[in-house]
Each structure stands twice: as structure tokens, then as C-alpha cells.
Image (cartoon, rainbow, N blue to C red):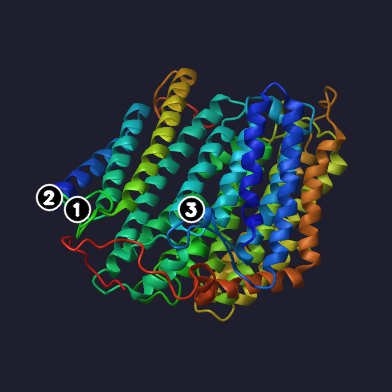
Amino acid sequence: MSHWIAAPILIPALAGAAMLLAGERRLGLQRALGIASCAALVLSAAIAVDSSASGVVQPYFVGDWPAPFGIVLVLDRLAALMLAVAAVIALAALAAAVAGERPWDARGRFFHPLFQLQLVGLNGAFLTGDLFNLFVFFEVLLIASYCLLLHGQGEARLRAGLHYVVVNLAASALFLVGVALLYSVTGTLNLADLALRVPRVSPADAPLVRVAALLLLVVFAVKAAAFPLYLWLPRAYATAAAPVAALFALMTKVGVYAIVRVHGVVFGPDAGEAALVAAPWLAPAALATALLGVVGALAAPSLGRMTAYLTVASVGTLLIAVSAFSTATLGAALYYLLHSSLAIATLFLVTGEIAARRGAVGDRLEQGAPVGRPVALGVLFLLSAAALVGLPPLSGFVGKVMILRSTGTLPGAALMWSVILVVGLLSLIGLMRAGSIVFWKATPATQAAPPHRRLTLVPPLALVACGAALAMFAAPVQRYTDAAARQLGDRGQYAKAILGEPKAATTRPFPAGVRTNGARP
Amino acid sequence: MEILVASAIGLLAACGVYLMLRARTFAVVLGLTFFSYAVNLFIFATGRLAVGVPSLVADGATSWADPLPQALVLTAIVIGLATTGFVVELALRARDQAGTDHVDGAEPGAGEREA
């Protein structure tokens, strides 16, 4: 058991605590700590990806309590991939927040500790091996995101923040109901143990398990911003500071990740009475999410809101592939997940740069002062938009081709294909319109463009480069994502790695005098 | 006892949902609190209801209460307290800035609401 598995949680936790000890006045020290922590996370994620490449599932027993009794972290291919994309985006977002003429981190208090806390929650959610800790890490990342969303204050942000917080609190309560229901029937919350026990639930208890699965689906759909639960997202993301919005691009992916992990595995194809209970709901919701997201993007009054709606559309496309719950589509979906996280984060950062260089108009899609540094920013916008929409030869194109190929033989493929392609076309139209308004329909300059630093273009440029690398090395990445999808399907290996052999006895006492219903081993 | 606990949870949840759907932040916060009470009771009840059994393990006991839901509910209460505190502060701040406690930050029909 390697202790390094816990590093992606411990590094930001320690860095955040150190920042609080250093005091908020020492911004330079906080920045250094933040960047160092994010760089260390990139490194640890690279190690995680490499050590999971052989296909071994590595559990980490916190306090050396044996699973399923103690808290367990699990590093497998999927978790390693998610850690990697989170670390890369976090580093770029933090660099963007620190750079700039009026850096975001100086516009409010405690930006850096909150940022690290958010990373604790994200990485914890990716690594945790039990459902209740998934809830706990969700709460960690949410409470940090509430504060980050409000960072820099302003009435619009407060208003959007209230909706966001209330919706997510209600979702958290539902999460607990789902978790409790599942525990009451199976007597465990360890994901590996659940994957073994859910198929053996008696027919009498099966409806309860199905209810729990669907409640959890609702919760994850809120996080992922799937139809009809995406309404909180556009306003919140559009009003958030650009680097924060870039980091938030990951949060919708946490919802998708949880759907893959819980509904793809625990309630997956072999889950007996509760097998694929999510699929009939998820597939139409995914199609509607993609379409409504892109319609919202077309109608968006500002670039920020357009990007926020494109986030919804990309989640829809992603969920179309996920909702088939087969190994092939899951592999394609994971590639698309990497791509869309990078592309959305890039577009948010570019939007922030454009807004900072257009004077009073900001990112609103109306005629305004010419953008400072139009060539560099224009090319960046073009590249990030083309990647997001899926124009060849960028990563979006590769990802969409993979999804189209993997869904080609499924029933309802015609509908999926048309939705995915129409969504791509409409996003292209929307982004082209936005780009031409921002860059070409400028009023004659009445005053000098606001001052800016050239350095601020580096973080989005780095993310564009990552996206290009994703396209260039599409074949090895696809092999990895396909292997990750296969690994997810292998419940036996997962359970063996975590629970060991012979499997530990039941986790809960069953008092003789108390009625317990259902089959228990 | 089952009926009593079940209907208490149901009533709390119903009150919570009703209040959460109100348009004023104060009612929404109360609704969230009611709903989290309902959820906490529900988690507690998933350990099965039993009277007069040891809370954990005792010598010679033939039955005992399930300790796990107690731990879960404790965590949920702590997290719920923190988030409720946060949302109260947020609601106060929003009321202070917008001059209204409507959840949309403006009275209905008070003109353009979008930022």
C-alpha cells in the first residue's frame, strides 16, 4: 500500500492550512504556495496515471482499517485520469488568477486557501472508495465553491450565488436520503462492497434500491447540470470570476464522474434487480441537455453566459455517450470528458481575457471598444472555440468521432447522431457570431485600450497546447480511456483489490430483536 | 413507533419542501433546515428502530443499535450546521445589497432582473 495515493488530497489540504497560517496579507507567499501545490498536484497526478497504467487497482486504507470497515481511497485508471485533468486545469486557472493587471486573487479575501480547499474536495471525490465520503468531499468542494463564486462580491454574484447554494444544499439533502436508503438495504456504503451486494438484493428490497439509485441520479444530475436541473448553472458560472469559472468547469465533470462510478458500476449492467435503472432516464435527459444548452448559447447576451451554456451542451454530449453504459461508449465518453473539461476551461479563461480588454462593454455581445491585442486573443479564441465545437484536427473532433463511432450500432443512434451533430453546428454558429461581434464589430477606439500584461495569455495558451496534445496523442489516450472503461466493467477485480479474499464479513450488526428485511449474506 | 417516526419524517420533509419553494430567503432557509432535520431523522432510522438496546456493544447483549447511522448522522449534522450558517449569512448579505429578501434579488415585476 503506497501512501502516495493520498497525496492529491493531502497536498492542497496542507497548502491551504499553511496559507491560513501565513496570514492573508502575505499574498506573495500565498501565491508561491498555491502554485507550488498545483505543480505538485500535476506531478502526483502524472505518477498516479503512470502507476495505474498497468491496470492495477490500488486501494489506500486510511488508518489501516480494513475495508469495508474503514475509509478507503481507491486509485484506478479513471480516478487517475480525473486527477490529471483536474491538476492541469487547476494550475492554469490559478496562474490566470495570479497574473493580470488587476489579479483576481487580490480582489477579495482568502482566494488561495479556498482554491486549495476546492481542490481537496475535487481530488477527494475522485479518489474516494465509498459513497458517504463522496458526499463529504462533495460538501468540501461545494462550500469552497460557494465562497469562490462570491469572490470579488457584487450584487449579480450574490444573487446567482444564492440560487446556486440553495439548489446544491437541497441536492445534498437528497444525496443523504439516497445514501441512507442504500445503507438500510445493503448494510454497506463501500463502493466495492456495494457492487457485490446490490446484485444480491432480494426482490422485496429491490424497489428501495432502485429509488436510492434514482435519487442519487438526481443529485449527480444537479452537479453535472443535466436537463432539467441545469438552471442554476448559467448565471452562476457567467458571473463568477474567469479563473473560478474555469475551475468550475471541472465541477460538472464531477457529477458525470459520479454517474459513471455509481450508476455505471454499482448499478451497472450486472446489478441484478437494479441493473441500469438510470439508463431510461439519463438518455432522454442527455439529449435534451445538449439541445437546450446550445439553444441557450445561441441566445446568450454575453460571452461568459454563452460559455456557461456551452458547458451545459458539452455535458449533454458527454451524457449521451455515458447513458449507453457500455464499455465502448464509456471509453469514448472518458476521452470526450478530458477534452471538454480542457476546452471549456480554456474558453472561460479566454473570455476573462477578452472582458478585461474591452473596457466598459466587458464580455457582453454588443458593439464596443476594440479588443486590446486582437491578433493574439483572436487566435486564442479561434483555437479554443474550434476545439470546443469539434473542428478537425483538434481534440473536440477526435472526441466526437469516437462518440459517434461507439454509439453507431446502438438503437436510437440516428437520434443521438443528429443531436450531437446539430449541437456542434449550432455551437459553431454561436461562437462565430460572438467572435465576429467581439473582434470585428468594434466602434472606433475613443480611448486607449486598458493596460494589460502579455503574461496573462500564457495560461489559456498552455491549456490550448494541452488540448492539441490530447488530439495529437489521441491513440495512446484512447487506449488508456478504453482500458479505464474496461476496468470499470470488471467488478470482480475491483472488489478483490479492495476487499481482499476472503471477503470480510458483514459491516453491520443485525440485532436479533429488530426486524431486518431482505437477504443478507 | 414506526408510524410515529415515519410520519414525523414525512411531515418535516413536507414542511421543508413547502418552505423551500417560497420566494423569500427567510422561508427558504427555514425550509432547508426542516428538510435537513427530516433527512437526519431518516438516516437515524435506517439503523432500524429498537428500544432499550445498548448503543454499541455490551457484554452479554444479544442485540444492539447499529452504530454506523449514528456516525453518519453526526457528520451530516455538522456539515448541515456549517452550510446553514453560510446560507444565512449569504441571505443577509443579499438582502442588504438588493434591499429585498426576494430570492431573485428583486421584487417580482420590478423591471429588468438579469444582470
Q: Name the disc covering residue A432, or none.
A: none
Q: Chain of mark 2?
A: B
Give, as a three-letter code, the residue at label 1.
Answer: Leu
Q: Name the disc covering residue A134, or none.
A: 3
Give, as a three-letter code, the residue at label 2.
Answer: Met
Which image quadrant is residue A46 in? bottom right
Q: Chain of mark 3?
A: A
Q: Are marks 1 and 2 on the same chain?
A: yes
Q: Which residue is mark 1?
A: B49
**Sooner in the amino-acid sequence: mark 1 or mark 2:** 2
Residue A493 % position (x, y):
54, 75
Q: Are marks 3 and 1 in contact (CB under 8 Å)?
A: no
Which image quadrant is residue A19 in? top right
Residue A489 % position (x, y):
53, 75
Q: Secondary structure at mark 1?
A: loop
Quadrant assignment for the C terminus of chain B: top right
Q: In the picture shown, does residue A243 fall above or below A25?
A: below
Q: Which residue is mark 2?
A: B1
> Left or right of A20: which side holds A501?
left
Give, as a three-letter code, the residue at label 3.
Answer: Leu
